Image (cartoon, rainbow, N blue to C red):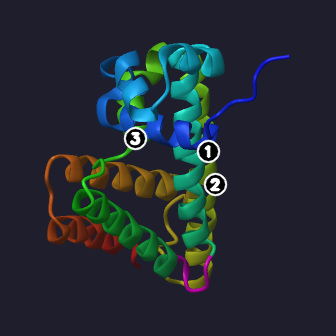
Amino acid sequence: MGRPRQFDEDRVVRAACDEFWAKGFDGTSTEDLCRATGLTRSSLYNTFHSKEYLFRRALSYYVNTMTARQVAVLDTRGSGLERIRSLLAVIVDDEMANRDNGGQSGCFTVNTITTLASRNPNVARIIEADLQRRLSSLRLAVMDGQLDGSVVDDRDPGDLAWYVTSLISGMRIAAQSGADRETLEGIAAVGVRALTP
């Protein structure tokens, strides 16, 4: 019978998430992961088997956490447009908080899409499932907005959901490029105006 683990696996996944978010899959070494998690190489591989598996666990943790927050914002009371506006405000707040706390700017998911998803089907599946979940929530908010008159009704709800998703990705990339709060709020305001009848 093996010895019980002497560490919190969820804490290790969170630490690995921060490391992969900062450096990407290719830029993160096993030594980086050992340093970030406090585990030895053998403990890391005995538990997670491979760097790729740990990356997938970290990415799943990230998308589940972030998407749950976004879905919760979209499930609040208010018009469809108010809920979308609130979501964009959360994105701005997240980016500024990450910067102020020395965390990562931008989006781990966007970074992964542009660097790894096209060459790793397992990672691509995580990204696709997350995308569909976010699009579904946004589509419902758009449809509610079209019904309550707060969102333009001459566009397909699916297309507008994609528009908002693309807007959020663009805001995250802008934050990585050094955009300040005023700039990000300006991008969000333009996006909201595009949705307004």
Please say if the residues under marks 1 and 2 sit with CB atoms less than 8 Å apart: yes
> Overall secondary structure of the magenta stretch?
loop
Between the residue at mark 3 and the residue at mark 2, the CA separation in whole angstroms equals: 27 Å
Give residue 107's quadrant in the image: top left
Residue that numbered label 1 is attached to: 132
Q: Which of 82/121 is in front?
A: 121
Depth check, mark 1 against mark 3: the one in front is 3
Q: Which of 161/20 is in front?
A: 20
Give residue 94's quadrant in the image: bottom left
Magenta stretch encompasses residue 34: no
Seen in the image, is 66 located left or right of residue 93? Answer: right
Above or below, comparing residue 49 to residue 82 in the picture: above
Residue that numbered label 3 is attached to: 18
Mark 2 closeness class: few <14, some 14–19, many ≥20 residues within 10 Å: some
Give the secondary structure at mark 2: helix
Q: Earlier in the sequence, mark 1 or mark 3?
A: 3
From the top left corner, tell me how far across and down residue 77 is, in percent: 61, 85
Amino acid on which disc 3 is placed = Asp
Give the secondary structure at mark 3: helix
Tally of numbered discs:
3
Q: Which residues are magenta?
A: 76-80
Depth check, mark 3 against mark 2: the one in front is 3
Q: Which of 58/117 is in front?
A: 58
Amino acid on which disc 2 is placed = Ser
Residue that numbered label 2 is attached to: 136
Q: Quadrant of the C terminus?
A: bottom left
Residue drawn at 41 percent across, 30 percent down? 112
From the top left corner, tell me how far across and down residue 61 is, in percent: 57, 43
From the top left corner, tell me how far across and down residue 119 is, in percent: 46, 13
Between the residue at mark 1 and the residue at mark 2, the CA separation in whole angstroms equals: 6 Å
Between the residue at mark 1 and the residue at mark 3, the CA separation in whole angstroms equals: 24 Å
